[in-house]
Image (cartoon, grey):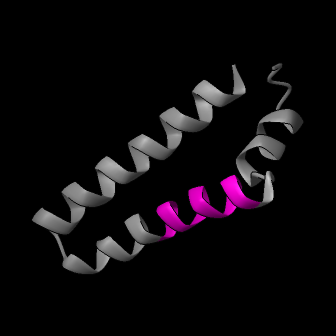
Amino acid sequence: MKNRIIRAVAGTFILISLLLAIYVNQNWLWFTAFVGANLLQSSITKWCLMEDILTKLGVKD
């Protein structure tokens, strides 16, 4: 369950930031890069802040 939520949040953030970059300001692409860097960091270290947040909110695996 957590993995689905994490993927949904990351995908939503990326799509929203791309739309903001197109229609508002290109600097929103930095947010897209930040999300991508966090996904890469999570795959290397096997630690994800969003997973910790979801655990504290009571979301089960």
**Residue at image point 54% right, 68% down:** 37
> Is the residue 48 above or below the residue 20 in the image?
above
> Is the residue 49 above or below the residue 5 in the image?
below
Furthest toward the front, the residue is 44
Q: Quadrant of residue 58?
A: top right
Q: Quadrant of residue 38?
A: bottom right
What's the magenta bit mostly, secondary-structure-wise? helix
Q: In this orientation, which residue lies closer to the viewer: 47 or 5? A: 47
Q: Is residue 53 magenta?
A: no
Judge from the rendering whether residue 9 lies leftward or rightward of residue 38; answer left or right: left
Q: Is residue 37 magenta?
A: yes
**Residue at image point 38% right, 76% down:** 30
> Is the residue 51 above or below the residue 5 in the image?
below
Furthest toward the left, the residue is 23
- The magenta stretch is 34-44
Q: How many marks?
A: 0
Image coords of residue 50 (percent x, y): 71, 47
Q: In this orientation, which residue lies closer to the viewer: 33 or 19? A: 33
Image coords of residue 15 (percent x, y): 30, 48
Judge from the rendering whether residue 9 lies leftward or rightward of residue 18; answer left or right: right
